[in-house]
Amino acid sequence: MSFIRLIAGRRFFVWAVIAAATASPVLAQPAIEFPFDQELLLETPPMRPGKRMPSLTVERNGNAIIDLWCKSVPARIEFSEGAIKLEAAPLPDELPQMQSAGQCTPDRMAADGALLDRLTQVTAWQRQGGVLTLNGAAPIRFRAAAN
């Protein structure tokens, strides 16, 4: 007895196989997850003098550290499906101890404030491949650090 004849009388089985074969591949894909516990570097050219690049590191509990061009600030991030809300502490007055003299120019310090303002205005996020895009007034793109 052939396999086809064996299942011919079992309509439920046949319909289940057809439904599984024609199901949308989107349903089978796992939800895209936020890249928690990774150092994410801002996609932008370096700003001289200095090698420091802005980065974002977010823990699963929503606590985050934002390393800007010169300064670092703690933040709290809340997530829902594709939405995001970022609340950051104000920029500290003092520079980090590891900054060498002349590394934090007025341009770099002004860029700290501008980037922090943009980050606090983001409302949505998306991830495609290795790129995390935070959307707000203007998109901000991050990539996982390669170190």
Image (cartoon, rainbow, N blue to C red):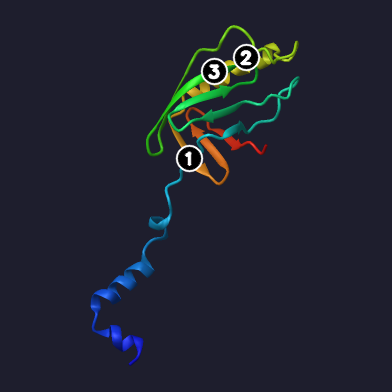
How far across and down, in percent of the image, does residue 113 sit?
Answer: 57, 16
The residue positioned 60% from the left and 38% from the top of the image is 144
Label 3 is placed on what type of residue?
Answer: Val
**Rendered view: 133 above or below 99:** below
- According to the picture, the residue beneath numbered tag 3 turns out to be 73
Label 1 neighbourhood size at 10 Å, few (<14), some (14-19), many (20+)?
A: some
Q: Is residue 103 left or right of residue 122?
A: right
What residue is disc 2 on? 110
Task: Name the spot of residue 121 as percent of width and height, x first.
Answer: 46, 24
Q: Secondary structure beneath disc 2? A: helix
Residue 126 is marked as 1
Corner quadrant of residue 16: bottom left
| Dot 2 amino acid type | Ala
Rendered residue at 73%/25% (across/down) = 51
On screen, residue 29 above or below 12: above
**Residue in the picture at 28% in, 75% down:** 13
Q: Pick the quarter of the image with the N terminus.
A: bottom left
Tag of residue 29: none
